[in-house]
Image (spheres, rainbow, N blue to C red):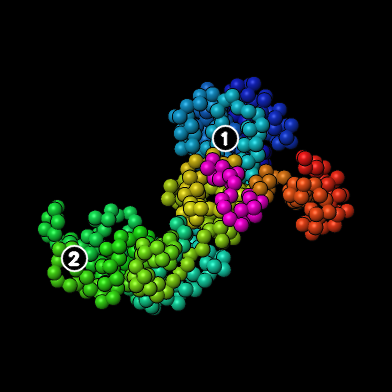
Amino acid sequence: MTSAVWIIDDDRSIRWVLEKALAHEGIAHRSFENAAHALARLAHETPSVVVSDIRMPGTSGLALMQELRERLPATPVIIMTAYSDLESAVSAFQGGAFEYLPKPFDVDHAVALVRRAIDESQRPAASPGEEEAAPEILGQAPSMQEVFRAIGRLAQSQATVLITGESGTGKELVARALHRHSPRAGKAFIAINTAAIPRDLLESELFGHERGAFTGAQAMRRGRFEQAEGGTLFLDEIGDMPAELQTRLLRVLSDGHFYRVGGHTPLAANVRVIAATHQDLEARVRERLFRDDLYHRLNVIRLRLPALRERREDIPVLARHFLARSARDLNVEGKRLTEAAMRFLAARDWPGNVRQLENVCHWLSVMAPGQVVDVNDLPPEVRADAAAPAGDGAQDWRRALEREVAARLARGESGIAESLTRDFEKALISQALQHTAGRRIEAAGLLGIGRNTLTRKVQDLEIDPPAD
């Protein structure tokens, strides 16, 4: 037999408050004054959710939770305590608590938490290994399928590849995939971010140096070109490479030889170069910040990675993949997003792209209070970004509208189309009347509607005439 919610607390007043609140919401419940009575009842009933005090005479709430984790691992446990300290919270979460509820608590908040825990208990468990086989690069969007096809076509090619795309779109992942599927897969893949290394050190990092080449060079050092011999060298953020090093890189790409810093013997470079940048290289060439001849040497085959906002249909599968991977890496129970939270994330623009989404999912794996993640559990900056006005551009109002729709859906509102249509028409007509100083015939003409239609909508929408 299964009952809904078990309340375990030695404080009768706490039990009474929760009983009344749950009864008002139509949630079945049972109360116990200590953990021993609750454990004895397990022989006859299985709770869907347990709400327990942390400190009670006899068996503590934490000990009870450990017992429940062994006997009923899928049952969410909410731990209550009047001791709102770090140690109690950490102990509760380390023990596998669904949520930590400090006393005194808001009754509505407690009931909402219980409802979320009930939803969690009713979700089917993910089958073992369900996410294990997920590939490193995910994407169902047509733009990503084009990238996958390009990787396949380039599998046997030795051509230099230039990968472009905004920061966080996965340029290094694509470079690794190109290497992994190439004849050079058995050799090294060496990556270097040319923007992250000081200008004075970058030449030595790329080409190595001879002993005594400069102060502190006490031994010969092989550079990245030599380390990648027979394999692939990935030059990330190539657009930031200093001009003098652009000249040296061009020489290597042109004749296949280079010199270590301070060296006099040419060394052959049997390396496939894959470069990447988030910058507009054509613009940098026009601004004389990047060599035109080097650009054409690198731009043999170009792969453009789409921004995450251009492939919104991939956000749910990426989010689920990142949450599952974070759970495995952190050895914690996996989190799941509600439909509202998923819609909210899918409506965002993600300026940091896939990397930003991955970081958010990692944050949720550590910080989200329960196993089921709702909109209010998302990082504050993510929710704040959604409420912030969009940047410049012709698509701003559409993006703002998308965010508003997502926010209303996340709040569970209905009648959204009617409400937003009314707001939209009111804004159109109000602005047109302001523009024409209240002349309705002229405003109707500009909007492309009849004068009678405009007059009726002014009345229906309660639009105030423009001030003189």
Q: Which residue is mark 1?
A: 78
Q: 265 or 49: which is nearer to us?
A: 265
Instruction: Say whether disc 2 or disc 1 marks the residue closer to the N-terminus.
Output: 1
Write the residue at 56% across / 65% down.
Answer: 140
Q: Which image quarter: residue 82?
A: top right
Write the residue at 61% across / 57% down.
Answer: 394
Examine the residues drawn in magenta and state their main secondary structure. Answer: helix
| Quadrant of the rendering where the N terminus is positioned | top right
Q: Is residue 405 magenta?
A: no
| Quadrant of the rendering where the C terminus is positioned | top right
Write the residue at 54% across / 33% down.
Answer: 100
Tell me residue 326's x, y (percent). 46, 50
The kind of secondary structure element at disc 1 is strand
Q: Which image quarter: residue 79?
A: top right
Q: Which mark is residue 260?
A: 2
Specify the amino acid type for callout 2: Arg
Q: Is residue 181 visible?
A: no
Q: Is residue 253 visible?
A: yes
Tell me residue 425's x, y (percent). 77, 50
Q: 208 or 394: which is nearer to us?
A: 394
Q: In screen coordinates, is 442 left or right of 408? A: right
The region drawn magenta spans: 380-403
Q: In screen coordinates, is 268 left or right of 3? A: left
Q: Is residue 387 magenta?
A: yes
Tell me residue 21's x, y (percent). 70, 30
- Measured Cα–Cα span from mark 2 to mark 1: 63 Å
